Structure formats: structure tokens, C-alpha cells
Image (cartoon, coloured by chain):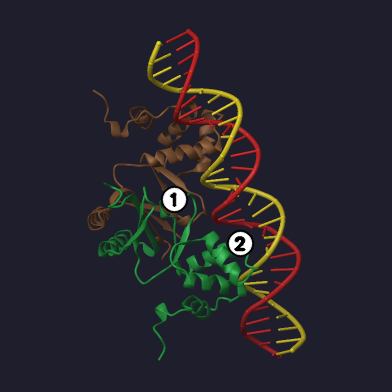
Chain colours: A green, B brown, C yellow, D red
Amino acid sequence: MPLPKTEMPGRLQAHFRERGIRMTQQRRAILQVMETASKHLDAAQLLRKAQKLDASVDRSTVYRTLQLLKRHGLIDELDLMHIHGEGHYYERKLNRDHIHMACLRCGKIMEFVSDIFENLKGQVAKDCRFRIVVSRLEIGGYCAACSK
Amino acid sequence: MPLPKTEMPGRLQAHFRERGIRMTQQRRAILQVMETASKHLDAAQLLRKAQKLDASVDRSTVYRTLQLLKRHGLIDELDLMHIHGEGHYYERKLNRDHIHMACLRCGKIMEFVSDIFENLKGQVAKDCRFRIVVSRLEIGGYCAACSK
DNA sequence: GATCCTGTTGCAACTGGTCGCAATCGCCAT
DNA sequence: ATGGCGATTGCGACCAGTTGCAACAGGATC
């Protein structure tokens, strides 16, 4: 009996195979890093980690693979309100969309899941007749500790 | 009897003066462009328009002024789901936050105001004890015309 | 296993955005 | 109106992300 697919390690690779996307050494390295990483990797970190698995991985391959993953809805892209400059961060898309909150003072990132968010998306889809593929809600402000 | 301040032309300049932020020739040019522009300017367009008013305006001054405006909550920064590359777009903050929807096929940008969005922010603020300064909800998908 | 075709890669050149520094300019006090 | 000081600017060098192109490698077919 197979494990549930949604959280199986190697899920990204499997996804590629199912959809007939060519698997290469470089992609294998990059996907492996994405799958085992804790959250919120930026592109430079991803490159460094992937190069440890396959030294030939190039910067542009990382970016191209990230775009591929984005297009297939397998990862989300965040900028965390640009607290740390212009860079972007990536995380595997999980079952449920979540909101990211970034504290403008201490830089802490928090996540939050809300039914109201789901309702809101439903309203947008219905009222605007818009078929939603990806959504991103980021909030900047002050966390409980910092707003004293 | 003065006009209501919130939508008076020159409002950004006035805001600077009130807060004691130094006003320079370059900033005057940039603010004037922001105030008279239609929405969703990117940094390069802003630079070109500002240079028509003051040829000495430099790229980095534009970026620094944008950061200043962001910090003071006078403009919002968007990336419109990166439909057109990495660039960012800026618009004056209006009275009411609005959602941006970007069609992944035709590139059209739509805006939407929702009470549910306000409720959602209220929930985040209350449940997470988070003091919200700025928020951004961007949705990518297919508009009514393109999803046929 | 060899061949072929197409998708993918590395590279180098480019655009978009940031930063440190010396020179300059607003603005306040006089 | 002048002087002085700190904030702001332009510049050049840098980091982040993209693109065009020639070489290369999956993987389907024989």
C-alpha cells in the first residue's frame, strides 16, 4: 500500500514524471533541495545547496527551474514585504494557502491559515468570474512583541 | 475653505512638509510624476518622466524616493504576479486597499474592493495580535474572457 | 546499444535594483 | 542674507534575475 502521495518525499520528482517533464541531473539536485529544505529558501541558498549535490548546476538553471515549478503550481513565490532587500523566497506549495506576515521591526515571519481567506477567494472568483490559479497575501506590520 | 486634503493635488508634497521631510528639486519632480500619473508605473517609466521635469534625477534617487514613500505608507508596491518579468509597479495609496488580479494569459490587471478583505485583516490583527501597516493581496489566474 | 530529435544547459551579456562614498544642497539659526 | 550641518544626491561598482545562443543530454525508437 503506497503512502499518501501529497507528502511523500520525492513528490516533486514524481510530479515531473507524471506530467512527462524531462528529468535531468541538475533538476534532480534542485528538486531534492526543495523537498528536504525547511521553508523560505532564496535563490542563492538554493543554488549553493544544489551545487553540493551537482557542482555543474548554474544560476540560470536554478531560476529556470523555479519558473517551471511556479508554472506547474508546485511552489509559491514570496517576497516577504521586501524586508531584506529585493530578493525572493520560495516554498513548496502545501495543501492549504496561507498568509505571510512580516514584522517590520524584528523581521520575524509568521504564517496564518484562515477560512475567511478562502471565502474571499471564492468571492473574487464568483463576482469577477476569475479562475484563480495562484494567490498571495502578504502583510507587513508589527508583531505582538514589537508593537509595545 | 480648503479642499479635502485626501485627494488634493500636491498631497504628497504636503505630506512631506508636515512630517518635516526635506524637499529637494529631485523629489519634487518624482512626487509630481507620482501624483499626476495614471496607475501602475514602474521604476523605469517613473525615472524617464521625472527626468523630463528635472534632467539631473538619477536612477538611485528614484529608488530611494520610492522606498521613502513606501516607509511612510504613501504608495503601494506591486509585482502583479511577475507577469512581465521581475519588475515592480507603484501606485498611490488610496483610501481603501484593493486586491489586484492579473490574467496569466492576456496580462490584464483588474482591481477589486471587498469587505471580506477588511474582515480578514481584522481577523489577522486580532488573532495574531499583529498591528498591520501594509498589506498586499495579488491573485493570478484567468479572466472571464480568457478562461473560455 | 546506437541514433535522432527536442528540451535543457552553461555561458556571457544584459536589465533591474542596491550600496558606499565624496560632493552638494535644504533648511534652520543667526 | 549668510553660514554651517546633516540629509540627500550622483556616481560607480556591485548583487539579483533574465535572455539568446551554441553545445549537450534525456529518452523514445529502432
Q: Kindly identify which residue carries mark 2.
A: A60
Local secondary structure at mark 2: helix
User: A123 left or right of A92?
Assistant: left
**Residue B1 to residue A68: above or below:** above
- Say which chain tag 1 marks: A
Determine the residue positioned at 27% across, 27% down: B3
- Say which chain tag 2 marks: A
* Badge nearest the viewer, 1 or 2: 1
Local secondary structure at mark 1: helix
User: B37 left or right of C19?
Assistant: left
**Residue B141 to residue A31: above or below:** above
**Residue A143 to residue B35: above or below:** below
Q: Nearer the viewer, residue A110 or A130?
A: A110
User: B92 left or right of B5?
Assistant: right
Where on the picture, by quarter, is residue B33?
top left
Q: CA gap, disc 1 to disc 2?
A: 22 Å
Quadrant location, the N terminus of chain A: bottom left
> Identity of the amino acid at label 1?
His
Q: Nearer the viewer, residue B105 or A5?
A: A5
Q: Kindly identify which residue carries mark 1.
A: A82
Residue A67 location, x and y as percent?
Answer: 52, 64
> Identity of the amino acid at label 2?
Ser
Q: Nearer the viewer, residue B51 or A34?
A: A34
